[in-house]
Amino acid sequence: MSRPFAALALPAALATLLTTGAPDLAALAGRASDEALARASAGAIRGVVRTVEVRRDPAVNAPYTHVTLEVERAWGFGASPRAVELKLLGGTLDGETLAIGGQARFAAGETVFVLVDVRPRDHSLSVTGLDRGKWTLADASGLRVVRRDAGEAPGTAPAATAADLDALGALAGTVVRLPMPGPAQAGEAPGGAPAAPPPAVQAPVRGRWHEADWGVPIAVDSESGGHPLFPGGGLGQLVRAAAAWSGRSPLLVQPGVLRGPRCFANGEPDDGRISVTYGDPCDEIADTSPVLALGGAYYSTTEVRVVGGTAFGKHTRGMVVLDNTASKFAWLSTGCYEQILTHELGHAIGLPHVDTPDAVMSAWLDPACVNRTESLPLQPADLSALAEPYPAAATTPGPPGTPGGLTAVVSGSRVALAWMPSLGPAASAFRLIAGSAPGAADIGQVAVGTPGLVVDGVGRGVYYVRVVAANAHGESAPSHDVVVVVGDGLPGAPIGLLAAAGPGGAVRLAWQPPPGGPGVSRYALLVGVSPDRPTARIAVAQTSIAAQGVPPGTYFVRAVAENGAGAGPASPEIMVVVP
């Protein structure tokens, strides 16, 4: 059987076999059983949707859709709740939508049966397997059940009744237990006739990368090191997965750079890139869930293009997050892993699931992938889904893509900078931006007409430089910083920066001195609430620091070493999540 993909999931049978030995491939030929999905769930609920509301979670700065259910029957709860709130990643706020591939959708007034699991970060409840864990009761008698929002392939959806769902509910909570119910899990249903629920916030359009219309490629960045369970971090599989979507339409997808960890709860709003992260850094996916990975994208609901009669919002950044539970990946071949990445990148470029079982964008991972070293090729159903937002058509003028390959060569006080223009529309000019910290622009900017610049008489110090390309139609997103160190005697970057956060805002950070080079007299931490955007500098005398009462949230931290000659370059950035 197979696991839901985006929900990307593996065969549920394989999930069970991971604890007992090598999988029996013959046993994996079918589709995932609902019984296996129920056993992986912490609980189950049958009830009526009363409210659907999108709110931003300030702890992680991401939109979540909150669904309140008036409970008719529940399984797996210590006490029978009258109302339960589900918290689903994604939604529309302030003119921007976060769309998660395969996410369950709810409408006020519908009667539903849902399997639930527990989000590790805050113990809120979500739907097991995304849309695979939701059913809608189509009539009051319960004799007809619509399986899920995302349809099954023709002829594959077995008949189901409310009694069938009750049998699934009895399996929930037998292996995974719910925590003690709290306000978000077991509230009181309103007495009397319920008030008219607020309308659900639905995105008026789908999302796509408008850059495809003028031939600008979309970069796919990877967290440094890649996935620890695959040779070379699985970066070769990521390159192939990106290439699978490129050249089959006007959309161009190409490998990007190595970055720090990202998740759906962070990232620059104008990033314009797809980030792939391993290890679920924001604790979004339950360890017991069948979900292996999440893919999706943010898009603007105000910057809209009509393509083939459908309105699409402009994607601003895409993300793929893989889970941190090693047992979920232990028996995957490189072919399975590459297909996971190809599927999730499909969601990050705006594609939904398709109903064809043997397609890459099917909701289920084909268990036959364990016999392959490469992904299943894109199938006709995948190419048809791709052609809807990205039909073959002549490109239109647009701004240039982000320049790549920025390098700096220092000789005394002379700095030579060079870079390569991106594919797509030509750049007529470039703008170099220099700052005293990553992402800063406090030192200055200079415009040049060609991809290169030599500057003499640069003063001693450490500079963070990026480049932007421009033409008559606008500017590109900035490149990533290159660090320019001018002058002898400056210390190198600290290494091995680590952090631990605990209850009560307790945070400890530690690092090692730069290996070799000039001596260090002190250190400083660069801290921000967005990647590559430090807003505070904390002086530290030693190679560690401990603090109490740090407000909950997600922080991005680098360390720098200093001596009498000045401050050296910053260490790689790490993310610190304070519960």
Image (tube, rainbow, N blue to C red):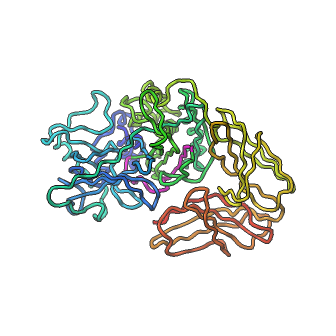
Give the mark count.
0
Q: Where is residue 78 in the image (x, y as percent from the top left)?
A: 23, 63
Q: Which residue lies furthest to the left in this view?
A: 141
Which residue is more in the foreground, 261 or 70?
Answer: 70
Which image quarter holds the N terminus?
A: top left
Q: Main secondary structure of the magenta part?
A: loop
- In the visual, does 14 lie left or right of 463? left
Quarter location, residue 401: top right
Which residue is more in the foreground, 316 or 124?
Answer: 316
- In the visual, does 116 lie left or right of 499? left
Q: Position of residue 35 (x, y in %)?
A: 27, 44
- In the visual, does 171 lie left or right of 572? left
Q: Residue at x 31, y 56 (%)?
A: 176
Which image quarter holds the C terminus?
A: bottom left
Q: Compared with residue 121, is residue 142 higher up or lower down, i.e. above or below?
A: above
Q: Which residue lies furthest to the front in this view?
A: 472
Q: Compared with residue 374, is residue 557 higher up or lower down, i.e. above or below?
A: below
- In the visual, does 142 lie left or right of 249? left
Q: Compared with residue 229, is residue 530 higher up or lower down, i.e. above or below?
A: below
Residue 154 seen in the current view: yes
Q: Residue at x 21, y 60 (%)?
A: 81
Q: Residue at x 35, y 59 (%)?
A: 124
Q: Where is residue 448 in the image (x, y as percent from the top left)?
A: 77, 43
Which residue is more in the foreground, 444 or 554?
Answer: 444
- The magenta stretch is 272-290
Q: Compared with residue 77, is residue 271 higher up or lower down, i.e. above or below?
A: above
